[in-house]
Amino acid sequence: MRLGLLALAVILAARQGPPPEPALRFHHLHLTDDRSPFLLEFYERLFDPAIVRRVDEGGGPGLRAGQMLLLIDKGALARGEPTALWHFGWGTVSLGDTYLAHARHDVAWEPPLPADQLHLHMRSVNPALAAAWYQDRLGARVQLAPVATRKDRVLPPPEHRMPEALVWLGETAMLIYRTEPPLFSTRGTQTDHIAVTCPDLDSALASLARHGVPILDRPSPRGAWRTAMVEGPDHLAIELVERS
């Protein structure tokens, strides 16, 4: 099974304190794969069995551990096309370390992993512009790397890169790395989309539409939720979740 896209990047670098409350908070990460029962068992084994539990939320199966919600249902096998969602992991994050620097720390790779510290590693053809979008459209907190440390001209292998932006959606971090185009839609891949909470779905969707954000799916009921889907930077699918 190809888990390259789902690599576990567990980082022990020091994290700066919790960000302020954004307008929209991170809600869940949604995986789709024909081998969903296997993936449920695989990820379930990564966490403390005392805190992780299987759930059925939004009309689909998944895992919840505290604030972390990982939904996994059936879908197409993973494509090899690069998308904005590079991979994800669990652990504290910082803006200044490359993977090689992380590897020199005493990283605890063995389970149980800190389920409450889910973070995402993102690709972008313009990390600063993508970070500004998350800040302006979703109310995220953003940190940018100093210009001198950005890899604007030289693109070393991803494992050596340093993120150029750190975006916080609530307590969930997204590290953004520069890459070359093209990037393809996340829809139909193993990491199909991310989701954010939305207290007023119609109002949020109208605001995003006024700013030219592409609407992928109009509002519809989904279990106890009402959801819609929009397209964020670099063709990242973002679901808006309004809970009843």
Image: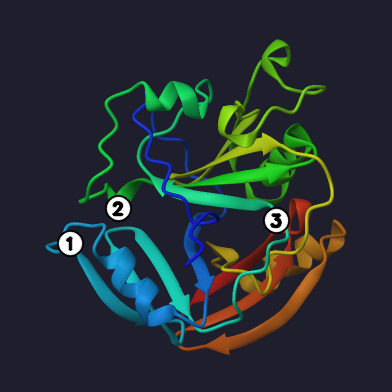
Q: Nearer the viewer, mark 2 or mark 3?
A: 3
Residues at circles 2 and 3 in contact by the CB criterion of under 8 Å: no
Q: Earlier in the sequence, mark 2 or mark 1?
A: 1
- Residue with the mark numbered 2: 115
Residues tagged 2 and 1 counted as in contact (Cβ below 8 A) = yes
- State which tag comes first along the sequence, 2 or 3: 3
Is label 2 in a helix, a strand or a loop?
Answer: helix
* CB contact under 8 Å: marks 3 and 1: no
* Residue sticking out furthest to the top: 148
CA gap, disc 2 and disc 1: 9 Å
Which amino acid type is marked by label 2? Answer: Ala
Q: Which mark is residue 83?
A: 3
In the foreground, 107 or 135 = 107
Q: Residue at x 64, y 21 (%)?
A: 145
Location of residue 201 (image quadrant): bottom right
Q: x, y percentage for residue 217?
A: 73, 79
Tell me if residue 16 can be seen. no
Q: Identity of the amino acid at label 3?
A: Thr
